């Protein structure tokens, strides 16, 4: 049974578009058109896009730390837990920084090796996970992990985005 469904990027974009015309200066060129339409949108609890000016401020804060990852990565979203979602400055690639690292060094960034568009699709799967958590507590074990059938379906859908993505994903202990 399909509890989770990988949806089309265009449908997700249409659903969450803020129709904003935000300035995307400071973000990589490849990200501008997409992020202009999703500025400030919460795609899921742990996939919250920042307004471009806030993203620039966060990136500047990171850059003020000597040896930080800011030369390669730009902050564009956060998890709601203090973690950052990052964009590679030169190629369409999303990374993740866990605030528990407490150090902005480049080696503390997990490169997911997915495009920004794939990240939006991944965020939509996590929106479905969040909704399941609220509407069907029976889908979860006592330790708040998904029961096997649900977990297998979620893994399958994430792997449809890119083979091996679930093992790289920072929230894979579901």
Image: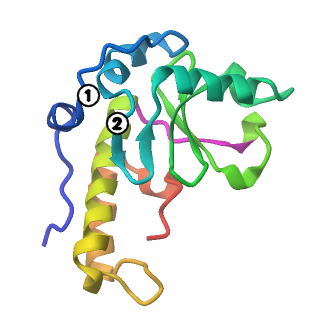
Number of numbered callouts drawn? 2
Residue 4 picture quarter: bottom left
Residue under the point 64% across and 50% down: 98
Residue under label 1: 18
Residue under the point 28% across and 72% down: 134
Residue under the point 47% across and 32% down: 50
Say whether disc 1 or disc 2 marks the residue closer to the N-terminus: 1
Above or below — where is 51 with respect to 112?
above
Q: Which residues are magenta?
A: 108-115
Residue under the point 40% across and 30% down: 115
Q: Nearer the viewer, residue 80 or 151?
A: 80
**Mark 1 to mark 2: distance in Å?**
7 Å
110 in magenta: yes
**Which quarter of the rendered picture does the C terminus lie within?**
bottom left
SS class of the residue under badge 2?
loop
Q: Pointer 1 and pointer 2: residues touching (CB < 8 Å)?
A: yes
Residue under label 2: 41
Q: Residues within 10 Å of mark 1 (few under 14, many from 20)?
A: some
């Amino acid at each position: 049974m399909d509890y989770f469904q990988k949806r089309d990027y265009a449908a997700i974009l249409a659903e969450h578009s803020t129709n904003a015309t935000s300035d995307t200066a400071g973000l990589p060129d490849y990200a501008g058109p997409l992020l202009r339409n999703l500025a400030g949108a919460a795609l899921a609890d742990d996939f919250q896009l920042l307004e471009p000016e806030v993203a620039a401020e966060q990136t500047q804060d990171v850059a003020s730390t000597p040896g930080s990852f800011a030369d390669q990565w730009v902050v564009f979203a956060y998890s709601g837990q203090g973690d950052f979602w990052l964009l590679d400055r030169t190629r369409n690639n999303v990374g993740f920084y866990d605030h528990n690292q407490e150090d902005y060094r480049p080696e503390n960034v997990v490169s997911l090796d997915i495009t920004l568009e794939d990240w939006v699709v991944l965020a939509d799967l996590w929106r479905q996970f969040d909704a399941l958590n609220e509407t069907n507590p029976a889908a979860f074990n006592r330790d708040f992990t998904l029961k096997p059938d649900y977990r297998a379906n979620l893994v399958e859908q994430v792997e449809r985005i890119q083979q091996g993505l679930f093992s790289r994903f920072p929230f894979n202990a579901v």
